[in-house]
Image (tube, rainbow, N blue to C red):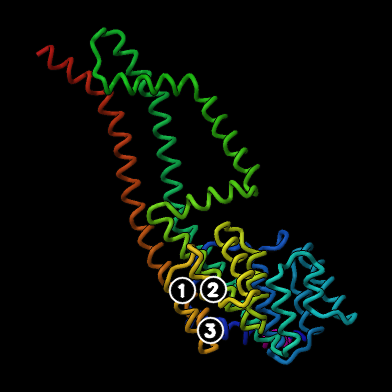
């Protein structure tokens, strides 16, 4: 068993290297539709489906493959879950039902596996799921990489301005009070802001915390989801990125589901139950209703503002030639490439803009504090 496992892992590494070389452009840069199970991360799902795919492709049966997966686990909680899946499969339960029973896999996972079992394409479905979660992980890492620096800079800027207003400005104010000189309007404004900050800093942080808790409490309310999502779509530049993210993730998921021979209406229903972005959720609800009434997919998409004309036009072609799966993959890839370019530009623009913004804030405070000294020097001369 150890020799077999070593050979399987070697094959897995070779296939992974080949996959990385051929598919590095197919990155998921999109809004996460949130397929995470209860405490089961996308990284763990990628590892599980990937290893299971390699083991099954190597000729092992489900029982032996799951036994190897269970043996390799170091996390007690995960090992317990995999053991439950293994025990159910040994008792004759299908893998899809065993995954569903854990409560840690979503509908996209076990429905895809179920279709793979019914059609005899289980290895292909596991490979698709592995690729899917690998792309989701790449998406998350890229977004974190783009926005981590601006967030760090903003936090640093806030801390620097807070320090200047509450420590430096009061010391200058003591000097100005002893001179009894008339202060410029800019200096007076900064000193008033400093006084307000010193007296009400605690209340300000408490207010921000209260607002954050309030938004967190109502985050699942339909009215809040509607307002916040539509506001995000109307933001300059960011709104277009959000729109592309949502569409890219939708078409990627539809491609995965239709490749598993799930009917279009069922695939749309599954995605609608998974998405958390309100405009897309309502659009999918309308599309599902329209398709059940005999309307074509591209006609329903054209009536939803969340989709652009290019998407509905290509879907129309896919329906006419019965190649929707290929069209979904094409749209997913195109939006991925556009998002990669747009997010790269966003990251390049944010850095100089934030630096200029911080320099402006600090410069205004420093000028306001030194301006009275310059005036006093000119009076002495």
Q: Is residue 4 magenta?
A: yes
Q: Which picture quadrant has residue 14?
A: bottom right
State the residue lying farthest toward the right: 91
The front one of 36 and 358 is: 36
- Considering only order in the chain, which callout, 3 or 2, is on the residue closer to the N terminus? 2
| Disc number for residue 319 | 3
Query: How far apart are the alpha carbons under marks 3 and 1?
Result: 12 Å
Q: Which residues are magenta?
A: 3-8
| Disc number for residue 311 | 1
The 10 Å Cα crowd at callout 2, few under 14, some 14 to 19, many 20 or more, is many
Element under disc 3: helix
In this picture, is 195 found above or below 316? above
| Disc number for residue 69 | none
Where is residue 64? Give x, y as percent.
80, 84
Q: Nearer the viewer, mark 2 or mark 1?
A: 1
- Give the quarter of the figure containing the N terminus: bottom right
| Disc number for residue 251 | 2
């Amino acid at each position: 068993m150890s020799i077999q496992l070593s050979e399987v892992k070697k094959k897995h590494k070779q296939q992974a290297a080949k996959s990385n070389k051929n598919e590095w452009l197919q990155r998921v840069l999109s809004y996460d539709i949130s397929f995470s199970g209860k405490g089961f991360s996308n990284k763990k799902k990628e590892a599980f489906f990937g290893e299971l795919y390699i083991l099954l492709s190597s000729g092992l049966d489900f029982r032996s493959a799951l036994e190897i997966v269970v043996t390799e686990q170091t996390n007690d909680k995960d090992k317990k879950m995999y053991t439950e899946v293994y025990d159910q499969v040994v008792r004759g339960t299908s893998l899809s039902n065993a995954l569903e029973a854990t409560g840690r896999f979503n509908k996209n996972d076990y429905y895809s596996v179920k279709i793979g079992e019914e059609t005899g394409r289980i290895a292909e479905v596991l490979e698709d799921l592995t690729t899917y979660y690998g792309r989701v992980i790449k998406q998350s890492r890229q977004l974190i990489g783009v926005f981590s620096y601006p967030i760090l800079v903003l936090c640093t800027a806030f801390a620097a301005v807070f320090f200047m207003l509450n420590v430096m400005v009061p010391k200058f104010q003591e000097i100005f009070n002893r001179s009894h000189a008339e202060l410029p309007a800019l200096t007076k404004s900064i000193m008033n802001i400093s006084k307000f900050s010193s007296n009400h800093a605690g209340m300000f942080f408490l207010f921000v915390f209260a607002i954050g808790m309030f938004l967190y409490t109502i985050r699942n309310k339909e009215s809040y989801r509607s307002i916040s999502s539509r506001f995000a779509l109307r933001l300059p530049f960011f709104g277009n990125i959000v729109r592309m993210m949502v569409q890219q993730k939708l078409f990627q998921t539809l491609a995965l589901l239709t490749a598993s021979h799930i009917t279009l209406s069922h695939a749309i229903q599954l995605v609608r139950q998974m998405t958390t972005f309100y405009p897309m959720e309502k659009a999918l609800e309308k599309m599902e209703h329209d398709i059940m009434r005999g309307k074509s997919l591209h006609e329903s998409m054209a009536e939803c503002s969340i989709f652009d004309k290019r998407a509905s036009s290509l879907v129309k072609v896919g329906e006419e030639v019965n190649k929707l799966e290929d069209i979904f993959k094409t749209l997913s890839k195109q939006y991925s490439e556009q998002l990669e370019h747009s997010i790269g530009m966003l990251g390049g623009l944010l850095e100089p803009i934030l630096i200029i913004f911080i320099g402006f804030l600090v410069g205004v405070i420093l000028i306001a504090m030194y301006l009275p000294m310059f005036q006093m020097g000119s009076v002495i001369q």
